[in-house]
Image (cartoon, rainbow, N blue to C red):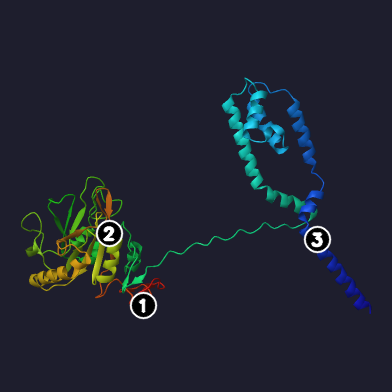
């Protein structure tokens, strides 16, 4: 019996406490209005009235006094502090001849801006005072979370993936590279250490320089010391740098530049596109071109695509060039640019713009860089690791 009575009393006490706290939470405004004024408010009002009745300050202290008096007038809703104009007129009358009109208006503007900033944060201070004086917990309303829209994925249209960017080429590259190392990695990936490589820079008519691949990789001039690259062109007044894509028979050659008779191995072929927008070039290269060893931005109107062909002779190479012209000119590639002996060299400057490499593959496959075998979205193949490297959900219609 006593146990049941004790439980009943405890239950009634809990109900009373919860009802009281609920009433305080629901009637926050009433509790705030009924609370006693803080002790500091009476002293502030007396200080404000004394400052308002006192004569203006002497020269040198008028700016400080105007800022102090103006803030108190705004706080206590003085008729002369309704807005910036009325407060500025009050200052001009009070400090006639002591403060210029522009000074008075600037002080009034600053005071109202300061007051507006305080009003924005007044809700938090009121909740803090209410909690301290009455024991009421007031939670700040939560902000609506901002939802970031995801970047649209490339669409699969007509069997061709569109919307491919340079970043996609970077991610599809089997080996990671930075632009500061792209030139040496480009030479190392395309040539064997003992093969002769010809590079040329800063002028269409300049003679090419021939070294072995290993010698180029060990070349460190004063201009290239910060980046450890074999060949760097100046940023201004330069036509960029070129690389002869196929290895040469030796260091010596007839004429100003190597010819087809000086080539030791017809390994690569150049594809160039200048009269198509850059974003469309990325889509075409990624979807339609197979055996891509490297893609380099020419710092001009297009990309240079280095395609591996492995021709066994010069005659076979010439036939491959003619077949490529019939096949790729309809896609937008330049007929004169297909089969050229030189490609743009990465990390060289052309009229202030960098020739940057966006894709590199030492062992290219007989398939495009990007493909959609299952119709499920964008995928590409990592040749070095023998696995799919990246995929996205399909967006867009066929």
Q: Whole-Å distance between the Cαs marked 2 and 1?
A: 26 Å
> What residue sits right under mark 1 in the picture?
375
Q: Quadrant of the N terminus?
A: bottom right
Q: Whole-Å distance between the Cαs marked 1 and 3?
A: 61 Å
Res. 138 in view: yes
Q: Quadrant of the C terminus?
A: bottom left
User: Disc 1 or 3, which lies upstream in sequence?
Assistant: 3
- Residue 186 spot, x, y in % from top left: 25, 62
- Residue 311 spot, x, y in % from top left: 13, 72
Q: Is residue 351 left or right of residue 107?
A: left
Task: Give residue 23's mark.
Answer: 3
- Residue 317 spot, x, y in % from top left: 11, 70
Question: Dividing the picture into quarters, in which one does residue 74 lie?
Answer: top right
User: Disc 2 or 1, which lies upstream in sequence?
Assistant: 2
Task: Give residue 12's mark.
Answer: none
Circle 3 sits in a helix, a strand or a loop, which is it?
A: helix
* Residue furthest out toward the top: 97
Q: Are marks 2 and 3 in contact (CB under 8 Å)?
A: no
- Residue 219 spot, x, y in % from top left: 22, 55
* Residue furthest out toward the left: 254
User: Disc 2 or 3, which lies upstream in sequence?
Assistant: 3
Circle 1 sits in a helix, a strand or a loop, which is it?
A: loop
Circle 2 sits in a helix, a strand or a loop, which is it?
A: loop
- Classify mark 1: residues with Cα within 10 Å, few (<14), some (14-19) or many (20+): few
Q: Whole-Å distance between the Cαs marked 2 and 3?
A: 68 Å
Res. 266 in view: no
- Classify mark 3: residues with Cα within 10 Å, few (<14), some (14-19) or many (20+): few
Q: Nearer the viewer, residue 112 or 207?
A: 112
Question: Dividing the picture into quarters, in which one does residue 211 lie?
Answer: bottom left
> What residue sits right under mark 2 in the picture?
277
Question: Dividing the picture into quarters, in which one does residue 70 lie?
Answer: top right
Q: What residue sits 63% from the left and 59% below the top?
A: 142
């Amino acid at each position: 019996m006593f146990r049941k009575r004790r439980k009943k009393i405890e239950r009634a006490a809990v109900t009373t406490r919860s009802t009281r706290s609920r009433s305080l939470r629901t009637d926050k405004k009433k509790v705030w209005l009924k609370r006693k004024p803080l002790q500091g408010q009476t002293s502030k009002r007396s200080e404000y009235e004394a400052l308002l009745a006192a004569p203006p300050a002497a020269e040198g202290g008028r700016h400080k006094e105007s800022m102090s008096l103006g803030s108190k007038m705004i706080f206590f809703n003085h008729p002369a502090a309704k807005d910036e104009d009325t407060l500025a007129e009050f200052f001009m009358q009070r400090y006639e001849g002591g403060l210029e009109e522009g000074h008075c208006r600037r002080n009034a503007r600053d005071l109202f801006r300061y007051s507006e900033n305080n009003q924005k944060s007044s809700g938090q201070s009121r909740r803090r005072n209410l909690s301290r004086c009455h024991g009421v917990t007031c939670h700040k309303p939560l902000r609506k979370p901002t939802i970031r829209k995801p970047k649209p994925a490339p669409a699969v249209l007509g069997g061709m993936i569109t919307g491919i960017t340079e970043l996609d080429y970077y991610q599809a590259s089997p080996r990671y590279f930075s632009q500061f190392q792209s030139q040496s990695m480009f030479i190392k990936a395309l040539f064997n250490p003992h093969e002769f490589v010809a590079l040329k820079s800063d002028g269409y008519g300049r003679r090419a320089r021939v070294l072995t691949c290993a010698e180029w990789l060990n070349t460190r001039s004063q201009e290239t010391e910060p980046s450890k690259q074999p060949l760097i062109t100046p940023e201004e007044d330069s036509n960029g740098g070129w690389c002869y894509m196929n290895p040469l028979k030796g260091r010596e050659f007839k004429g100003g530049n190597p010819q087809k008779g000086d080539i030791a191995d017809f390994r690569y072929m150049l594809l160039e596109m200048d009269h198509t927008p850059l974003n469309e070039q990325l889509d075409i290269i990624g979807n339609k071109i197979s055996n891509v060893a490297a893609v380099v931005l020419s710092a001009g109107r297009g990309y240079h695509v280095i395609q591996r062909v492995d021709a066994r002779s010069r005659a076979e190479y010439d036939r491959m060039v003619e077949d490529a012209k019939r096949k790729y000119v309809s896609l937008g590639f330049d007929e004169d640019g297909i089969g050229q002996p030189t490609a743009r060299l990465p990390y060289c400057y052309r009229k202030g713009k960098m020739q940057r490499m966006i894709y590199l593959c030492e062992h290219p496959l007989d398939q495009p860089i990007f493909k959609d075998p299952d119709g499920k979205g964008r995928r590409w193949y990592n040749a070095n690791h023998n696995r799919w490297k990246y995929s996205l959900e399909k967006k867009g219609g066929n």
